[in-house]
Image: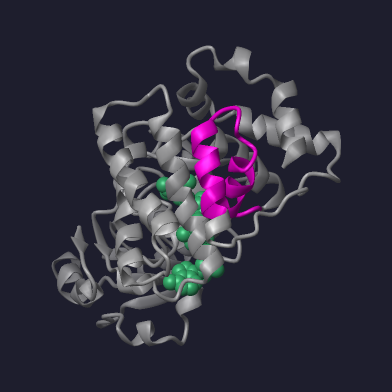
Amino acid sequence: MVYGRGSFNQLDEIVAPQRKDGMPMVFLIDHFFEDTPLFNRVPLRNNDKIIYADVSYEPKTTYVDAIAQELKEEFGSISGVIGIGGGSTLDLAKAVSLMMNNPGSSADYQGWDLVKFPGVYKAGVPTLSGTGAEVSRTTVLTGPSRKLGMNSDFTPFNQIILDPELTSNAPVNQRFYTGMDCYIHCIESLEGTFLNEFSKSYGEKALELCQYVFLQKEIWDEECDDKLMMASFAGGMSIAYSQVGVAHAVSYGLSYLLGVKHGIGNCIVMNQLEDFYPAGVAEFKKMVAKNKIEIPGGICKDLSEEKFDVMINVSLGMKPLWENALGKDWEKIMTREKLRALYGRL
Ligand SMILES: NC(=O)c1ccc[n+]([C@@H]2O[C@H](COP(=O)([O-])OP(=O)(O)OC[C@H]3O[C@@H](n4cnc5c(N)ncnc54)[C@H](O)[C@@H]3O)[C@@H](O)[C@H]2O)c1
Ligand SMILES: [Fe+2]
């Protein structure tokens, strides 16, 4: 990894040794950056290609498959994929890299350790801080029957470039929601049963950085962007060796059924989790108030019982998350009825 303000300028030099004869580097860039100055800084050479990632919706397996198919038809193979954007774009880049070398559909690989072959070279350049997608061994995709990551040893980036300058345009609300993803990763990891010294060391550091930027600082400045980028990295490292917990398990159901985005979905759920993470939720509420953020409510009020069932099924399918949060006997603790009641409050 490289870190630092302006480190984006090293991209050309970093990808140079990865270029293979005649095969392009593909720059997958968050559509927010179309026609912005960043475009002119992308180190295009020869037959390199830019694809603007449409992240209006979080990544779907069909979108990943379409991009990989298009690249195979146009070039046969490629030198690598460089993802530049928020968590959605980073996940797309990871998944496209894998699908350049694995047969079938990305939906076939949603799960744990199903990916068979390493992908093409992949690098990640985050432009929002919080998801930890820059370091995780997953790429979260919505498929035909579930929202689940391609979790594998082949999934992490070969290279990441952490340049906090790139996050400076983020809108206040988006920055907060994505930043809270990191805060919630810390709470879920530190309060989880899978906790170990590796996860604890990174989780505590990430938590301290989140508390500093969201509670202690009076105004948002460059120092906050710098610190939140390192918090995201450390939070991602923390969950790499443990797991997320209740907020994520419940929020996955929301996003599968209603398309609620990850960051805001986690906030909507966290707002109601006093029973599970009392201290974390109290502090979360302080952060919401201090940063003057609205957390939506009542989003499930008009849903039919059938729809609640869909969310409950998606959520309870996230077994490792529940086990981390509640221990081996989690099924006795988080019953369908309890989860139905929780969804009803969101
Ligand atoms: N792989 C993992 O480990 C992991 C972990 C957590 C979340 N995720 C995934 O990450 C995604 C959420 O990512 P996110 O919260 O970073 O948001 P995002 O990538 O979905 O982007 C949110 C919005 O911000 C815009 N944006 C991005 N950078 C910007 C910038 N610098 N300035 C202004 N606008 C900018 C995007 O265009 C988009 O409209 C979800 O798809 C979630 O599933 C992955
Ligand atoms: Fe997350």
Q: Residue at x 13, y 67 (%)?
A: 17
| Magenta residue check for 204 | no
Residue 138 in picture, x, y percent from top left: 40, 44
Where does residue 28 sit, x and y in percent of width and height? 40, 69
Identify which residue is drawn at 58% across, 56% down: 289
- Say which quarter of the image contains residue 47: bottom left
> What residue sits 52% from the left and 68% below the top?
172
- Residue 34: image location, x then y, percent: 47, 82
Question: As rendered, which of 103 and 180 lies closer to the eye?
Answer: 180
Q: In the picture shown, does residue 241 fall above or below 75?
A: above
The residue shown at (37%, 24%) is 194
- Relative to 211, residue 78 above or below: below
**Based on the displayed image, in which of its 4 quarters is residue 59 positioned?**
bottom right
User: Along the horizontal axis of the image, is 263 left or right of 2?
Assistant: right
State which region is magenta: 260-288
Which SS type dominates the magenta stretch? helix
Vertical placement of residue 302 versus 14, above or below: above
Query: Taking 1 as reference, is 34 left or right?
Result: right
Quadrant containing the N terminus in the rendered view: bottom left
Q: Quadrant of the C terminus?
A: top right
- Residue closer to the observer: 212 or 255: 212
Going by the image, does 133 lie left or right of 143? left
Position in image of residue 106 (x %, y %): 49, 47
Residue 314 visible in the shown view:
yes
Q: Is residue 241 left or right of residue 304?
A: left
Taking depth in this image into account, of 151 and 232 the one nearest to the observer is 232
Residue in the foreground of this view, choosing between 334 and 139: 334
Instruction: Residue 98: tell me if it is visible.
Output: no
